[in-house]
Image (spheres, rainbow, N blue to C red):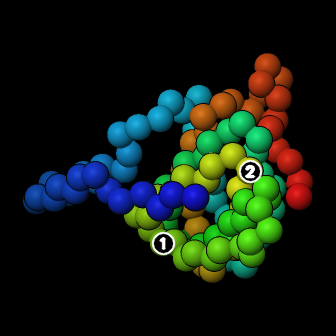
């Protein structure tokens, strides 16, 4: 897993521009809202890289590389944070408050590519 640092931030009287990422090829983008206390995920992808940008709220993310015997690592993210989940990283999202995020995938989850979602 990679936590992303914003490559640029600019603010003036009009508002703010926050540079999130300048890399990757994304084939699918989703806007996800989730109520407080909900658990999502608990799966991994064999081929797909997943980028997440937290629009609002706060989540707890547990990540574990299924190819290794190491325990899960746990992170907390809030509005403005971004991270990348690599293939074979099982990920579990627990919302701490009502939350919304943008999810971008390197491969579209469709009939042509398959769903690439594996339950541990």
* Image coordinates for residue 14, horizontal then vertical, percent: 15, 54
* Mark linked to residue 1: none
* Image coordinates for residue 55, horizontal then vertical, percent: 47, 60
Q: Residue furthest left?
A: 13
The local crowd at label 2, few if under 14, some if 14 to 19, many if 20 or more residues have their Cα within 10 Å, is many
**Along the polypeptide, which appears first: circle 1 or circle 2?**
1
Q: Residue at point 47% right, 61% down?
A: 3
Residue 30 visible: no
The quadrant of the image that shows the C terminus is bottom right
The local crowd at label 1, few if under 14, some if 14 to 19, many if 20 or more residues have their Cα within 10 Å, is some
Q: Mark 2 — residue?
A: 88
Q: In the rendered view, would you say 100 is above or below 85?
A: below
Mark 1 and mark 2 in contact? Answer it, CB < 8 Å. Answer: no
Q: Residue at point 66% right, 31% down?
A: 107
Q: In the rendered view, would you say 120 is above or below 117?
A: below
The quadrant of the image that shows the N terminus is bottom right
Q: In the rendered view, would you say 36 is above or below 87?
A: below
Residue 36 visible: yes
* Image coordinates for residue 43, horizontal then vertical, percent: 81, 55
Q: Mark 1 — residue?
A: 78
């Amino acid at each position: 897993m990679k936590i992303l640092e914003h490559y640029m931030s600019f603010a003036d009287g009009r508002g703010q521009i926050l540079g999130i990422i300048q890399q990757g090829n994304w084939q699918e983008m989703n806007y996800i809202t989730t109520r407080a206390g909900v658990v999502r995920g608990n799966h991994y992808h064999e081929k797909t890289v997943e980028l997440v940008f937290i629009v609002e709220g706060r989540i707890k993310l547990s990540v574990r590389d299924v190819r290794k015997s190491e325990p899960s690592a746990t992170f907390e993210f809030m509005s403005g944070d971004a991270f990348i989940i690599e293939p074979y990283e099982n990920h579990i999202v627990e919302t701490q408050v009502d939350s919304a995020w943008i999810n971008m995938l390197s491969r579209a989850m469709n009939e042509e590519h398959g769903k690439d979602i594996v339950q541990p």
